[in-house]
Amino acid sequence: MSEQISEKRPFFVYGTLLPNQPNFFLWDYAITQMTKALIYDCQLYDMGPYPMMIEEQGGRTVGMVMHVADEFVDNVTNHLDTLEGYDPDRPETSAYQRALRMIQMENGRFVKAWVYLGAKKFVQDYPKIESGDWQQHMQVKQGQIVDWWETIETVAGLHQSEE
């Protein structure tokens, strides 16, 4: 077991690992406590089907601090590292870095937790999620998709390039 993992810190998650999101199943069995929380000086970006959070002055990201049962920490960490494409033996090759950061819990107290941080170079062509809240953003996005489909009878001709 790596020295970092043995610290048994909680995780701060902000995207597809949250409850009611597509990757929650990867670790729901191991979670002992979930608390709403914020991380400051971090900004979310919409990468399409998932968000990327980068360190950015003035940003704020909404998420949850998840505590994992001790007996599942290694297994969960390995699953999450795999999902995020993080290689602890070669972190310089990873799009996301797993790092310890201070997180503000909903009661105002701070806790140190693992977070997965992306790099600015990966978000250059993607929109900021101004609210910093992936779940809220996805609800709005889903609503926009539903609204769009209500005005469309066919997608014929939508994919033709203009010549």
Image (cartoon, rainbow, N blue to C red):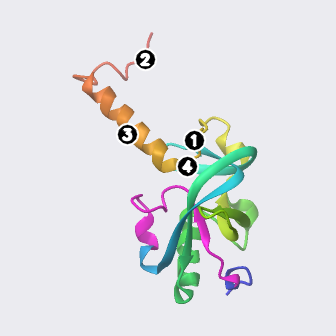
**Foreground residue, 49 or 110?**
110
Checking the image for residue 142, the label placed there is: 3
Give the residue type that dot 3 points to: Gln
Q: Which amino acid does the dot numbered 2 rest on? A: Ser
The residue under the point 44% across, 12% down is 162
Q: How far apart are marks 4 and 3 (CA)?
A: 15 Å
Look at the image and tell me in which quarter the C terminus lies: top left
Mark 2 or 3: the one toward you: 3
Give the mark nearest the N terminus, 1 or 3: 1
Which residue type carries mark 4? Pro
What residue is rendered at 58% in x and 53% in y?
62
- Residue span colored magenta: 7-27
Element at badge 3? Answer: helix
Q: Mark 4 points at which residue?
A: 51
Which residue is rendered at x = 59% and y = 45% of the image? 132
Under circle 4, the secondary element is strand
Q: Residue 58: x and y, percent?
A: 74, 43
Image quarter for residue 82?
A: bottom right
Kind of residue at disc 1:
Ser
Residue, disc 1 = 131
Mark 1 or 3, which is nearer the eye?
1
72 with respect to 121 (left or right): left
